[in-house]
Image (cartoon, rainbow, N blue to C red):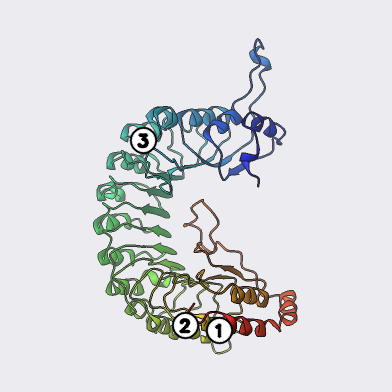
Amino acid sequence: MFDVSMFLRHNFARVWSIAPATLVSLEMGYISSVMVTELLSPPVVPYQSIEHIRPSILPGIQKLCLSVDYITDTMISTITNNINCLTHLDLRDSPIMEPRLAFDLTNAGIQQINLHGRLKHLSLVRSQEIFPAYFKRVNDLGILLMADRCSDMESICLGGFCQVTDTGFRTILHSCSKIFKLRIYHGPHLTDLVFHDIAATSLTLTHVSLRWCNLLTNHGVARLVSNGNLSVLDLRDCRNIGDEALRTISNLSELKALLIDGSDISDMGLSHLSKGAMHSLVSLSIRGCKRLTDNCISFLFDESSNCELRELDLSNIPNLSDAGILLLAKRRIPLLELRMRQCPLISDTSIMVLASMKVDEEGWYGSSLRLLDLYNCGGITQLSFQWLKKPYFPRLRWLGVSSSVSRDVLDALSRNRPFQHIVFHGEELGMTGQWDNSDDLYMHDYDEVDELEQWLEGENAGDDEDIQEAENNADPML
């Protein structure tokens, strides 16, 4: 890992000339599209015969993941023409303004993808983080021309293609028969018609993400889930998805991860999951579903269910209170991750309940939680930190709290539990970075408490008093 900005542009390609030919994977957090072009273009000396032109740098690269300022036709052409072994291409840009023609991707550029026919995984995403920019110069024709070369593709991710309609997206489904991962982000023209005749295809989709596709409705989801092999389904920020969609999703017997943040579901809608897919789900995110209340917990987890859930996101649910967390604790679900950030009604009581929870009669206090996000919860005070120290939550490795918490208290807790990551600026806990890993279950490599940690905890036993002293000195209003 290094900072690309440390290099003068004309020196950057020369640095990579010493890279070994055996290098097969390259990921860069940020690099300009001009530098990419210069890096991958083979140098040509004037008046030199074509036989003596140096081969391209990094000839063995198979996987290339780049975050750039602009994805352009020139960059795509350079990558395609100079990397012959490429099987995995992941490009993401974040324009600070609407790109001009020379600095944009068009139909001419996108049809050059996979000229060598070896590409298996393709991701082209225009991020909306800085400026609401889209790929406005790529339409259905460009997708059609690209799809002709992508019949062997296994994974496709397209983000920000605002001129592509159902015709273009259906072309992918009907031309790429081997695809099993499909992700479409910010598809304002994607409707239910994309999946109208999906049952007539030979597709075996296992991972589908349709984020920020607001024209998608319950009917389209019903058509999609007729493909019963789905194990990961991401419908975040699809505002028109409601209870009827959950009724059909509940029939997916192999579903492991479901993300339906910001949808129009209700407590009663979640009861459909408890009768079907909830028995196989490992990860569930219902963040920002405004209609949900404490009753959603009782609908999700009935007393007789044998639940495999390990990751639960209840963040940004205004009507979720301590009563809902009490219901969750009573069900003794062995969660590894619990997120409930930005919940105004969650208070110290929830922390006490979770700290006192036992998954089984011989288990430890604080259940099996390894990640707990309490950022900006309305009722959390310094009192909670009495329950976040030993012996409670013995397996906790990630903790999210508000920045208003006294730094002395946080420092004392860090000394008390040196293996715990405490985050207090609102960052998402445990995330692996900019690349979207919503398909990956168990992203975090949690270490069990070993003899070294037990010894360190024994050495730091006096830090309990430090926490108590820091709490006494802190502002009680924080």
SS state under label 3: helix
Question: Few, some or many C-alpha atoms within 10 Å of disc 3 (few <14, some 14-19, many ≥20)?
Answer: many
Q: Amino acid at mark 3?
A: Ile
427 lies left or right of 449? left
Q: Which residue is mark 1?
A: 387
Residue 407: image location, x then y, percent: 59, 72
Residue 90: image location, x then y, percent: 51, 42
Q: Is residue 229 above or below residue 39?
A: below
Q: Which residue is mark 3?
A: 143
Between label 3 and label 1, give the one nearer the viewer: 1
Q: Amino acid at mark 2?
A: Asp
Question: Few, some or many C-alpha atoms within 10 Å of disc 1 (few <14, some 14-19, many ≥20)?
Answer: some
Residue 235: image location, x then y, percent: 36, 58
Residue 273: image location, x then y, percent: 34, 71
Q: Could you say which is closer to the camera, residue 114 or residue 341?
A: 341
Residue occupying the far top of the picture:
47
**Upstream in sequence: badge 2 or badge 3:** 3
Q: Is residue 51 above or below residue 235?
A: above
**Upstream in sequence: badge 3 or badge 1:** 3
**Are the residues at dot 2 and dot 1 in contact (C-beta closer than 8 Å)?**
yes
Question: Label 2, label 3: how many angstroms apart (C-alpha)?
Answer: 53 Å
Question: Label 2, label 1: how many angstroms apart (C-alpha)?
Answer: 9 Å
**Upstream in sequence: badge 2 or badge 1:** 2
Q: Which residue is mark 2?
A: 348
Judge whether residue 115 can be spotted in this image. no
